[in-house]
Image: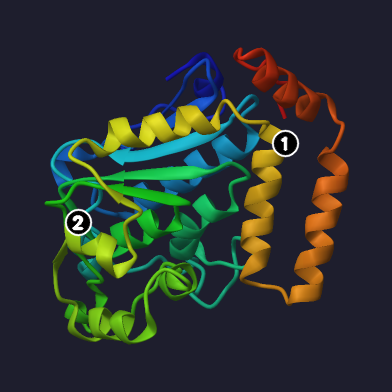
Amino acid sequence: MSATATATMTANDRVAIELAEDGVAEVRFVRGDKMNALDPEMFERIIEAGHALQRMRGLRAVVLSGEGRAFCAGLDLSNFARRPPEDEPSLTERTYGNANRPQQVAMQWRKLPVPVIAAVHGVCFGGGLQIASGADIRIVHPATRMAIMEMKWGLVPDMGGYALWRGLVRDDVLRELIYTNREFSGAEAQVLGLATYVDENPRERALEIARTIALKNPHAIRAAKRLQADMHERDTDAILMEESIEQHGIMRSRNQVEAVMAEMERRTPKFEDV
């Protein structure tokens, strides 16, 4: 981890963060021996990573990936035999704003103020697919094995899946994927709407996009992500007003002027950190 990331997240054997000088943070699931499956400790560490990123100075973009043979194989099956502690909150309790703990693991990537790019390879099942769906952009290896897996275990999709898949997957297609829990490839995921791009090297493609984003006005990027979220939640009048408010706050600011000057002078911009 970089010094910045280490100061905000305890070293552990589930999730690692590394912040580069250009403001791109790599978040890696490092439980590779278990295909980055989701156990209670993994949930806690992913949420801790989200908290660290929320506080991180100089953050411009996030690349999310998994080490080993999988992005994330979904729920660790040992969870089915686990007896919840008596003081564990009910799933209906909103312990993270509008979400419970499992939902926050996937929803927090949408809640981060900067763009998140998921680099997906190997296996991406169940909760792993929900986490990837929480990213702004998904780069997927064509041979990745993917599925909305919960119906296999007699459950409905959770971890925010229904909220995250709005606008990504056609309604009847989503129903078929949920009801049958059939497996599909990364190549098909792009056709279905669950992958932005298919690439033989998802991590490098994701980093390339993240580094491009890091060269843009960070205030404008964060405002654009806020507007993107509002686009699906608000009516037309409210969206138009929010757009005007965001633009009014950015126009003629130091970073906006710097973006113009850097383009005109054909040089790398030097932005003030958010």
> Counting residues from the N terminus, which is met first, the one under dot 2 or under dot 1?
2
Is 105 drawn above or below residue 83 in the view shown?
above
Dot 2 falls on a residue whose secondary structure is helix
Give the labeled residue for mark 2: 186
What residue appears at the point 39 percent right and 73 percent down from the top-left corner?
158
The residue tagged 1 is 219
Compared with 235, 96 (above or below) is: above
Amino acid type indicated by mark 1: His
User: What residue is shown at x 42% (from left), y 50% (from top)?
Assistant: 137
Which residue does the image show at 80% across and 70% down from the upper left? 238
**Residue 43: x percent and y percent?**
39, 52
Q: Residue at x 71, y 47 (%)?
A: 223
**Picture layout, residue 248 above or below residue 27:** below
Q: Nearer the viewer, residue 55 or 224?
A: 224
Q: Secondary structure at mark 1?
A: helix
Horizontal side, residue 25 vs residue 263: left or right: left
- Does the image show residue 272? no
Tell me: 66 left or right of 87.
left
| Badge 2 amino acid | Gly
Q: Is residue 202 left or right of residue 244?
A: left
